[in-house]
Image: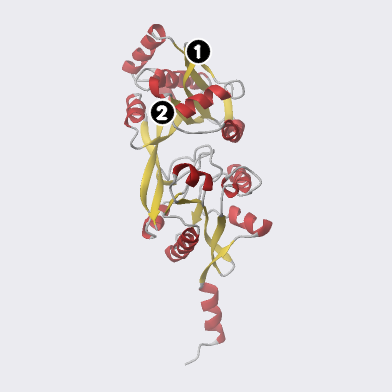
Amino acid sequence: MMSSGWESWCVQMNEIRVIEAAGLGGRAAFLGFGPGNGLSGKERRRKFFSEFRSTHPAWDVLPKRGPCALLAAMEGDKMVARVMTGVDLEFVESTGQKQGYICLFEAENRQEAVGRLMDEVVRRQRQWGSERVVGPISPNLVDFRSGVLVKGFDERPGVLSVHNPPWYDVLMTQCGFVKAQDFLAYRFQVADGLPDQYEGAAAWARERTRIAVRNCDLGQDERALLNVLNDCGEGMSLAELRMGLGAIRPYYQKPFGFMAWKEGRPCGFLLALREGKAAHLRASQFFIARPFRNGPTALLLMDALLKSARKVGILTVEASTILEENSASRAVMEGAGGTNHKIYRQYRLNL
């Protein structure tokens, strides 16, 4: 029995197809898609324009570093999932690893659509010579929207942080992706301050060590920041650092950023971000130079931030993101009274 015209139309409308978003209109539609991400209208607009720049090859971001594609899974005229995929040839050349990436992943809870989307990712990555795919990573290499939120869905979205519906982890794993690494976020109640033993240790360190903590000026201290980052193995250029500092400037207020020095040498920094006059901070960059990781540097920086936050009525500080295997930093966070309230996950798929 032949199908009626109505049945054929329904089949066509329900068919999932994957397209590449092209042109200004296609890119705008791609970036405007984001179901249930919990962001305010203002934050959605900021995220849109940040991602718009991050997908333009005129900027020194991933599209300028190798082949890439903006892929969308469509049901009729409706987008139901999206992802950007490509290869950072600078990374491949410097490491010898034949690795591609995914970023900007967003999806409705539609396994078939995401499956077809990732099938196209795999096809493209094999064409480009990749042996594995990792991500989601940050699209512009310097901001902080990496991974997928897998714990903390009911928590407030942080400044410049990932926030997505709870079904992303299942969608990724059912497509064959496996956990590569987790990043942890810790929350501090500012009114609680540091536990008594840590308060005492911080007071002792201020008196007995030569470590000085002062507010960080993003312009004057940029080379000191770069020295600490490179000591931590970040391998960042001054141009990349300046791009990253440009991303955080709208949220950076000097009373919530600190740099630690010992005898004229930068040994660590802690930069917290605030949206306007919000009662919450996100400590988004917390780096300690290798020779100082077993000392009181991290404690002194956290103590300075909590004291500054308390003066202006900040309620909570979220310290993120810390690698799960970074036991030293986790011990500092937990010993200082932080509770792990969010986890962000990156994945790997071997081809």
Q: Which residue is mark 2?
A: 188
Is residue 256 visible to the viewer in this orientation of the structure?
Answer: no
**Callout 1: SS:** loop
Furthest residue to the bottom? 1
User: Which amino acid is tagged 1?
Assistant: Gly
Q: Which residue is mark 1?
A: 264
Instruction: Locate the C terminus and report the quarter of the image it occupies.
Output: bottom left
Q: Residues within 10 Å of mark 1 (few under 14, many from 20)?
A: few
54 on left or right of 287: right
User: Which amino acid is tagged 2?
Assistant: Phe
Q: Is residue 170 above or below residue 251?
A: below
From the viewer's side, name the closer residue of 37 and 343. 343
Colouring used for the render? secondary structure
**Callout 2: SS:** strand
Q: Is residue 110 above or below residue 312?
A: below
Q: Which mark is residue 19?
A: none
- Of badges 1 and 2, the one in the foreground is 1
59 on left or right of 311: right
40 on left or right of 166: right
